[in-house]
Amino acid sequence: MRVLRALFIAPLTAFVGCLLAFFVADYLTRLAHVPEMEGQRGMTIFFLCVPLGILSKTGSLRASIGNEPVASQFIELKISPAPRKEDETWSDWIFATQRVDLSPVSEPERMELRYRVLPMND
């Protein structure tokens, strides 16, 4: 059943990655001032960026086809909508207590995380 599901999802995500790659690559090549002379920008998009977009979307499926479960632990971040000066310091360690499918995580497998919020300079 997993293989059948992956065979359906892989082409779908590859197609989505291909479409997204066109738009993102168009923006990035304009930003990098890639010249349009003799189709250089178009070839860069089609032969470099689109295959990378396809591979990036289908690469995540390789782990789901095999017998190994995919690491999918859930960690709740406590970030306020309006960051304060105190948020710029490192947070305490936060431990994952459950997986995405809401099953518990044993202590040896538990992931931990800490973060800090930095202001963006416009």
Image (spheres, rainbow, N blue to C red):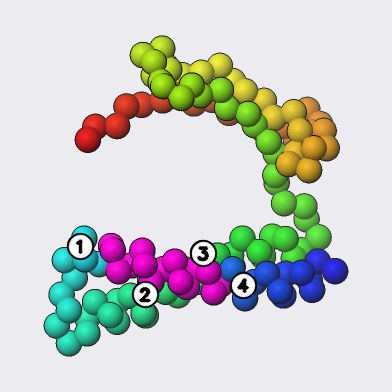
Mark sitting earlier along the chain (4/1): 4
Rendering coords of residue 59 (x, y %) = 58, 65
Mark sitting earlier along the chain (4/3): 4
State if disc 3 and disc 2 touch (CB < 8 Å): no
Rendering coords of residue 49 (x, y %) = 38, 71
Which numbered dot is residue 48?
2
- Can residue 80 be seen in the rendering of this structure? yes
CA distance for labels 1 and 2: 15 Å
Rendering coords of residue 7 (x, y %) = 72, 75
Mark sitting earlier along the chain (2/3): 2
Dot 2 crowding, Cα within 10 Å, few <14, some 14–19, many 20+: few
User: What residue is at 68 percent from the left and 36 percent from the top?
Assistant: 74
Mark sitting earlier along the chain (4/2): 4
Magenta: main secondary structure: helix
* 18 part of magenta stretch: yes
Q: Is residue 98 left or right of residue 19?
A: right
Element carrying mark 3? helix
Q: Mark 1 points at which residue?
A: 32
Q: Quadrant of residue 50?
A: bottom left
Amino acid type assigned to the residue bearing label 4 in the image = Leu
CA distance for labels 1 and 3: 21 Å
Quarter occupied by the C terminus = top left
State if disc 3 and disc 4 touch (CB < 8 Å): no
Q: Give the range drawn in magenta.
A: 14-28
Q: Which of marks 4 and 2 is in front?
A: 4
CA distance for labels 4 and 3: 13 Å
Mark sitting earlier along the chain (1/3): 1
Q: Name the residue under label 4.
A: 12
State if disc 2 and disc 1 touch (CB < 8 Å): no
Q: Name the residue under label 3.
A: 56
As drawn, the residue found furthest toward the top would be 86
Amino acid type assigned to the residue bearing label 2 in the image = Leu
